[in-house]
Amino acid sequence: MNILGDLAKSLLGGGKGASGLGGVVSELLSAEHGGLEGLVQKFQSAGAGDLIKGWISTGPNPAIAPDQLQAALGPDMISKLAKSSGINPQDLLGQLSSHLPQVIDKLTPNGAAPSAESLQGMLGGVLGGLFKS
């Protein structure tokens, strides 16, 4: 299996809830939350804009600590995501800080953010590939 398939498998397989971590990532990148552009704005507002821009660029992906991720997303968002996924908030932050840079990197292979419609289609393909093993 390729690296993208492995990543998707770890995202969907790791959660306890019906949607697991894959559902959390889908929620973070949903149109309701502004898609990737909305996520970039949240990071910029929290002073972590360089991190997410590094994930989008074609260079190496800078790491993000769970506390940085919580500051960027906000405690209310983390609480909501943890509740909907059935993942403990601290575990969720750990898993997201480990996987979110890779997901954003894979969704932006040319170093540019795709349109909202393209993003959802790509994300669906990445996460949908998990069910074919």
Image (cartoon, rainbow, N blue to C red):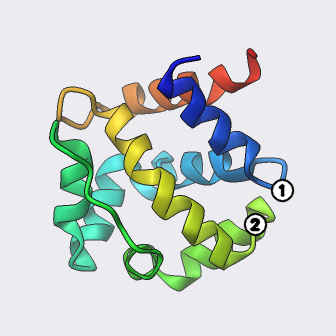
Q: Quadrant of the N terminus?
A: top right
Q: Is residue 4 above or below residue 97?
A: above
- Choose top left, top right, bottom left or bottom right for residue 68: bottom left
Q: Position of residue 113 (x, y in %)?
A: 24, 37
State left or right for residue 71 relative to residue 50: right
Q: Is residue 77 above or below residue 16?
A: below
At 59% from the left edge and 30% from the top edge, which residue is drawn?
6
At 26% from the left edge and 64% from the top edge, which residue is drawn?
41
Q: Between marks 1 and 2, how big is the CA–CA gap?
A: 6 Å
Query: Which residue is nearer to you in this view: 130 or 1?
Result: 1
Secondary structure of the residue carrying tag 2 is loop
The number of discs equals 2
Q: Which residue is mark 1?
A: 16
At 56% from the left edge and 74% from the top edge, which residue is drawn?
77
At 32% from the left edge and 62% from the top edge, which residue is drawn?
63
State left or right for residue 67 relative to residue 82: left
> What's the amino acid at mark 1?
Lys
Q: Which residue is mark 2?
A: 87
Q: Quadrant of the C terminus?
A: top right
Q: Position of residue 45 (x, y in %)?
A: 24, 76
Query: Which residue is nearer to you in this view: 121 or 104?
Result: 104
Mark 1 touches mark 2? (CB < 8 Å) = yes
Q: Position of residue 60 (x, y in %)?
A: 21, 46
Secondary structure of the residue carrying tag 1 is loop
Q: Is residue 114 above or below residue 51?
A: above
Question: Of the residues under marks 1 and 2, which one precedes in the sequence?
Answer: 1
Check disc 1: other Cα within 10 Å, few if <14, some if 14-19, many if 20+: few
Check disc 2: other Cα within 10 Å, few if <14, some if 14-19, many if 20+: many
> What's the amino acid at mark 2?
Ile
In the rendering, which numbered label is found on residue 25? none
Q: Position of residue 12 (x, y in %)?
A: 70, 41
